[in-house]
Image: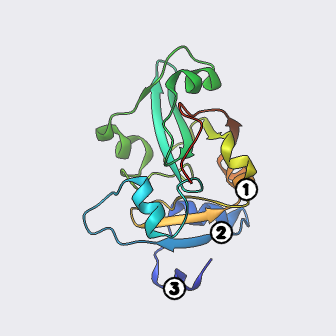
Amino acid sequence: MNENMAKIQKTNAMRLLEKAKIPYRVHTYPHENGALPGEEVAGLVGRSSRVVYKTLVTEGKEGYFVFVLPVCGELDLKAAARAAGVKTLSLMRLADLFPVTGYVQGGCTPLGMKKHFPTYIDESAKGLDTMLVSGGKVGLQIELSPLALAQVAGARFVSLLQDAVCPG
C-alpha cells in the first residue's frame, strides 16, 4: 500500500488482498469524465500499456467468464472460449456489468465480484514482476504480483490475445 491509502476508501478488491495478506500498491488517476481508455490510464499512472491490464467479462450458454489482458491487447474470443472449455463466448453487454459483477466500466476488477466466475489471465503477465489492474472503481489501479493475482482470483494463465504484440 502507498501513502495515498489514508485518503482512499477501501474496495472489495483491497479487502480481499489484505485478508489474503497479499502486498499491493494503489495508484490513482484523474477521471472527472468517467471511465478512460486503458492506454490513457497507463499513461496517467506512469506505466507501460504492457503492464496495465483490463478485465473483460464474457458470457455464453454456460455462464460468465472473466478475462484479464493488457490494455493494449484485444481479446481473442475463440481462444477465450477454448480456455474456458466452451463453444462460444461474447463480451457482456455494458448494461449487465454492474448487476452481474458489482463493478462499473473502468472499475471492473477480477477481485471481489458479487460472485466468483472462472477467471483467466493472459500468459503475458507471467513474465512481469508486477502488473496493474483496476482496484474496483474508476480512478483506482492496484499493482501486485501476477502470481498473487492468480492465486487470489483463482485464475489460470492462458493465451488470450488476438494480437500478441503490444507497443512498448
Distance between mark 2 and mark 1 Cα atoms: 9 Å
Distance between mark 1 and mark 3 Cα atoms: 24 Å
Distance between mark 3 and mark 2 Cα atoms: 15 Å
Is residue 146 left or right of 94 when viewed as pictured? Answer: right
Mark identifier at residue 6 = 3
Q: Amino acid at mark 1?
A: Ala
Q: Which residue is mark 2?
A: 24
Of residues 70 and 139, the one nearer the viewer is 70
Q: Nearer the viewer, mark 1 or mark 3?
A: 1
Q: Amino acid at mark 2?
A: Tyr
Mark 2 near mark 1, Cβ–Cβ under 8 Å?
yes
Q: Which residue is mark 1?
A: 148
Taking the spot 43% from the left edge, 54% from the top edge, the residue there is 38
Q: Residues within 10 Å of mark 2 (few under 14, many from 20)?
A: many
Is residue 48 shown above or below 113?
below
Q: Quadrant of residue 120?
A: top right
| Colour setting | rainbow
Q: Amino acid at mark 3?
A: Ala
Taking the spot 57% from the left edge, 27% from the top edge, the residue there is 80
Label 1 or label 3, whichever comes before in sequence order: 3
Label 2 or label 1, whichever comes before in sequence order: 2
Q: Secondary structure at mark 3?
A: helix
User: Extreme left residue here?
Assistant: 33
